[in-house]
Image (cartoon, rainbow, N blue to C red):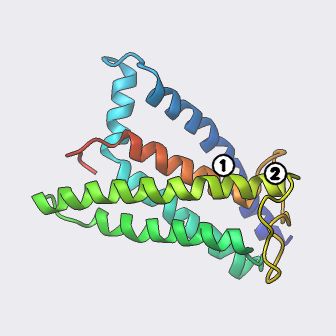
Amino acid sequence: MTPLVQAVTNFLSLGTVASDIFILFLFAIILTPLDQTGWGKKITKFLGDHAILLSFLVAAGSVVGSLFYSEYAHFAPCELCWIQRGLLYTEAVILFLALFARKEEHVRKFHAWTQKACLILSGIGFPIAAYHMYLQLGGGAIVPCSAIGPSCSYVYFLQYGYVTIPTMSLTAFALILAFMLLRRPNTAD
C-alpha cells in the first residue's frame, strides 16, 4: 500500500470503529426507553430532525471511499462489492435530492418515501455486507462467488482485527438504518 492509501485506510478504519461504537449507542436509544425527558430525548430529536442530512453524509462518504479504493488504490471490487455500491450509490442520489426539496406538502411525502427507500435499501445492503464480512473473516461460502473478478473473500486490508472494506459498508448501512429509524414525520431535515 502506498502511504496515501495507508493513511486513508487508517482514517476510515478509525472512523469505522468510532461509528460502530456510536451505532451501539444509537440502537440502545432506539430499543430502550431512556430518559425521554432529558438527554435521550434531545439526542433522538436532534438525530431524527437531521436524519436525511446525516444519512446523506454517510452515503456520500461511502461513495467517495469506494471510488478511492477502486480508482486510486486499484482495489478491484468483487461481485458483492458491486451490489453494496449499487445500493449505497442509489441512497446517495435519493438523499441528495431529498436535501434540496422545499418544505411543502408534496415534499413531506417525498421525505417519507426517502425514509422508506433508505430503510429498504439499507435493509438489503446490511445482510449482504454482513455476509461479505463473514467471508473475509474466514467463513465458508454459502453462495459461490462468481469466477469473474476478484474473490469475495479476498482481504485488501484488515485493521483493528475486524475492519475490512465490507465492514465499512456494513457500518454505513447500519448508520443509515439507525438515522432513518430515529427520523419522525414532519421533521426539519
The residue furthest left is: 105
Point out residue 158 in the picture as x, y percentages from the top left corner. Answer: 84, 55
| Left or right of 85, for residue 116 | left
Q: Secondary structure at mark 2?
A: loop
Q: Which mark is residue 97?
A: none
Whole-percent x, y for residue 175 in the image? 52, 47
Q: Position of residue 143 (x, y in %)?
A: 77, 64
Q: Residue at x 81, y 57 (%)?
A: 135
Vertical placement of residue 126 versus 152, above or below: above
Q: Which residue is mark 2?
A: 159
Amino acid on which disc 2 is placed:
Gln
Q: Compare marks 1 and 2 and give the one earlier in the sequence.
A: 1
Q: Mark on residue 16?
A: 1
Query: Residue 18 location, x and y as percent?
Result: 64, 41
Tell which of 149 and 39 is nearer to you. 149
Contact check, label 1 and label 2, Cβ < 8 Å: yes
From where the camera sits, is residue 104 visible? no
Check the image and report above or below for 79 versus 164.
below
Which amino acid type is marked by label 1?
Thr
The quarter of the image holding the N terminus is bottom right
Q: What residue sits 54% from the left and 57% below the top?
A: 124
